[in-house]
Image (tube, rainbow, N blue to C red):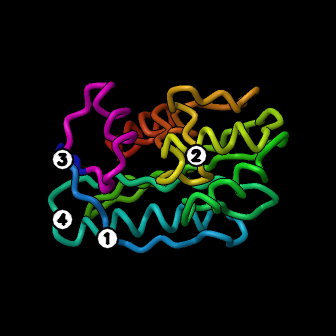
């Protein structure tokens, strides 16, 4: 099976490589701007599907794998920060609260489609302005939805998670493997 990962995310690449998957990377050019919209599983699955569809157009002999990860608080999707101030305000909003991370995956070929979503709940400790500023200065949060990466060195804001850590990082491996088996059976 010729698998293409429709993502430039180094984290998704790492997760798949760590399990021995052989794949090619062709990032999707689909514009997924859903920041500040009200969360729905269908919206995130729609984005994952459209990313895969964008890559399938020129690779219809392959199986395309895509994902879309959102961080949600108060039913509003938090995107990647525009700048340091936006990252600061986002992390302040997540301080001492529970939010969720939802990742939708799509496995698509010219004859089959499977989409699925995993959700993980994350609780942050109370964050001081100094904690937030120090983390932002690492530049780690500037390319991540919700302005944080749970896998980042020195990241200690999280006090509790309920669900798969890989989902928070951006690719729910357990869900993907279940759905890939399903995809291969059909």
Q: CA distance from mark 2 to mark 4?
A: 41 Å
Residue 136 shown in magenta: no
Give the residue at x 62% y 55%. Answer: 87
- Which sits earlier in the primary sequence, circle 2 or circle 4? 4
Residue 7 shown in magenta: yes
Check residue 136 in the rendering and tell me which mark sits there, or answer none: 2
Task: Specify few, some or many for label 2: CA neighbours under 10 Å numbering under 14, 14-19, or 20 or more.
Answer: many
Give the residue at x 45% y 34%. Answer: 173
Residue 102 position within the rendered picture, expressed as x and y whole percent measured from the top left: 62, 49
Judge from the rendering whether residue 1 lies leftward or rightward of residue 85; answer left or right.
Answer: left
Q: Which residue is the site of mark 3? A: 24
Q: For the residues carrying marks 3 and 1, which lies nearer the camera in this image? A: 1
Taking depth in this image into account, of 140 and 146 the one nearest to the observer is 140
Q: For the residues carrying marks 1 and 4, which lies nearer the camera in this image? A: 1
Judge from the rendering whether residue 31 lies leftward or rightward of residue 73; answer left or right.
Answer: left
Check residue 29 in the rendering and tell me which mark sits there, or answer none: 1
Residue 16 position within the rendered picture, expressed as x and y whole percent measured from the top left: 33, 34
Task: Specify few, some or many for label 4: CA neighbours under 10 Å numbering under 14, 14-19, or 20 or more.
Answer: some
Tag 2 secondary structure: helix
């Amino acid at each position: 099976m010729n698998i293409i990962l429709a993502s430039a995310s180094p984290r998704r690449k790492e997760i798949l490589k760590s399990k021995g998957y052989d794949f090619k990377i062709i990032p999707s050019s689909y514009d997924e701007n859903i920041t500040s919209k009200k969360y729905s599983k269908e919206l995130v699955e729609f984005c994952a599907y459209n990313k895969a569809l964008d890559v399938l157009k020129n690779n219809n002999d392959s199986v395309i794998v895509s994902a879309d990860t959102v961080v949600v608080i108060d039913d509003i999707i938090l995107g990647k920060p525009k700048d340091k101030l936006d990252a600061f305000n986002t992390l302040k909003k997540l301080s001492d609260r529970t939010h969720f991370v939802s990742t939708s995956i799509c496995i698509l070929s010219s004859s089959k489609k499977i989409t699925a979503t995993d959700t993980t709940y994350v609780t942050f400790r109370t964050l001081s302005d100094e904690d937030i500023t120090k983390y932002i200065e690492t530049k780690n949060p500037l390319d991540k939805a919700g302005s944080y990466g749970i896998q980042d060195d020195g990241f200690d804001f999280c006090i509790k998670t309920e669900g798969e850590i890989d989902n928070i990082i951006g690719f729910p491996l357990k869900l993907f493997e279940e759905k890939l088996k399903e995809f291969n059976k059909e």
